[in-house]
Image (spheres, coloured by chain):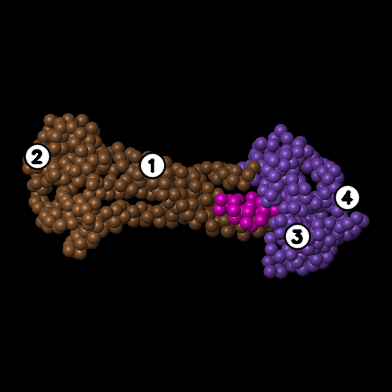
Chain colours: A brown, B purple
Amino acid sequence: MSFISLILKNLWRQKIRSLLAIAGISLGIATIIALGAIADGMEHNLIATLRSGKADFSIGQAHAPMIVMSSIPEARLYEIARWPEVKQAVGALVTFASFPGNPYFLTIGIEPEAFELGSVTILEGRAFAKYAEDEVLLGKIAANTLKIKPGDTVEIDLKRFRVVGIYETGNLLEDGGALLPLRTLQKLKNRPGELTVILVRVNEGFSVEEVMARVERDYEGSLITLRSAEEFNRNYQSLSLVRAGSWLISLLALVIGGIGVMNTMIMSVFERTREIGILRAVGWRRGRVLQLILGESLMLGILAAFVGAVLGWSVARSVTLLPQVRGLISPVYAPDLFAQALIIALGVGLVGGLYPAYRASKISPQEALRYE
Amino acid sequence: MSESIVVARDLVKTYENGRTRALDGVTLEIARGEFVAICGPSGSGKSTLLNLIGALDKPDSGELWVAGEDLAHSHGDLAGFRARKVGFIFQLHNLIPSLTAIENVLIPTLELNHSRREAKARARELLERVALADKAHRRPPELSGGERQRVAVARALINNPELILADEPTGSLDSKNEKQVLDLLRELQAERGVTLILVTHDPRVAQNADRVIELLDGRVIAPVAS
């Protein structure tokens, strides 16, 4: 019999109590995993949306809480496009529209000239005409899920459109949505002259950094430039909010789980007073008793981390199967996330086990042996 | 008389801030390999004496040497001393109920870094010696009172102690099991040359020993040396 097996046996003999403690911690862990995986997934897709294609950088509205709420006057696009250092600048209006069975259907208003810069490849059919009022291109994933072919009609925001082709950009979010002529979408959404994002390609011989710096200088306080994932995170707060929420839940899990484990372990130490006295009498040092009790609470944490990871994974997975978010969210299960969950679970075990273990180590053998 | 394993001089132990005088100047010597019974009514201080000899507690004053260790003036935790030198047998709830007989026997070996395999072999051998080889994987609730005490005897011997301390080991057994456990303790004490100190309130049980030390009100009333 090893020390570890003794720890497991001690947890096993109070099955219900141990399981309840594990359930408590693992719910917190599952929430952390599910939220984290969804946030990571959103981050991946949204970043790709902004940075896709052959653009050197993108421009968004400063202080916008999230990308679909970014609003840039179209006039800015024409100003920047005239700069000698800019080879090409195109604008897009990114919004959500209602679609049968999906109130958050991603729609991007764009001009056919911008397809190359946005990495749009036409797989079937043809591109829409620049000012067509009833033509739409459907993303590959959307077309597959909805079983729509070129020539079919779809209803977007209660208006009928003819699907003229199927496109692919390689980005899950974009491929789950639709492309419309920019003017048509601006009109449909009642946002004339408005853009969400500007994609910029810099002329050869100019430095991308200098052009980005000029945008930030000339339009200080109104426009920001985005180049990387981190910048995106820093500038669009909605994901930071999800992240902050996830950390807050982690903290709550730590506190609530820790109290639960502490309660479990104090009860367990109290019930085993005589037993601990016997261990001490047969030669166990205080430190060994401390290790035993702390080992038991850490083991609760480790078991809860595994249960919570499986649970969190299942929750995140089932969320993606909801029709409302299909194609919008694809959770990313980063090793970091699981490491974070394991550290939190171990923290819960440590926080909850320290005091009971200390108490147990202070039990005097001869007093405990008198205790019946 | 051969070398002494226990030497006590004027041992005093009080409880409740001196209001209860459990031991009131106990002087005694116990020889290595001896089987001694400490006998006395309840409250005579016999268990207190056993706890001092077993380094579970410390005397307020006096001298106490056990197996070469100065227990009256030692500092800190004497768990290491207990693990190596002493084997304890108690009256009740001696074993850990969730562990099997062999696991209970192995508990004291976790403290000394013995090889697991050797410890296990030794535990099997001891269980065989106490005639419980076939019940090695039963848990205490599945064993009779006598069987449980025999497991405790095997556990007391697992670390090869110099001294076995038994506090009313047959106190909760019927006469048949009592005889069996006492015979076993005697045999093991003789064949292993280990010193056995048995505390009891029952003169019949005490009769089994080489020598009886009688305690009353915290003092020795029978002759100290045989």
Disc 3 to disc 2, how far (Cα)? 99 Å
Q: Residue at x 7, y 40 (%)?
A: A132
Q: Nearer the viewer, residue A107 or A125?
A: A125
Q: Which residues are magenta?
A: A268-295
Q: Amino acid at mark 4?
A: Asp
Residue assigned mark 4: B210
Question: Please, what is the three-letter code of the amino acid marked with disc 1?
Answer: Trp
Q: Amino acid at mark 3?
A: Leu
Which one is closest to the eye, mark 2 or mark 1? 2
Q: Are labels 2 and 4 on one chain?
A: no
User: Picture coordinates of residue B3 (x, y %)?
Assistant: 88, 57
Which label number is shown at residue B52? 3
Dominant SS in magenta: helix
Q: Secondary structure at mark 4?
A: loop
* Residue in the image at 29% along x and 43% along y: A329
Q: Earlier in the sequence, mark 3 or mark 4?
A: 3
- Contact between marks 3 and 4 (CB within 8 A): the answer is no
Question: Quarter holding the N terminus of chain B?
Answer: bottom right
Dot 4: chain letter? B
What SS does tag 1 mark? helix
Checking the image for residue A313, the label placed there is 1
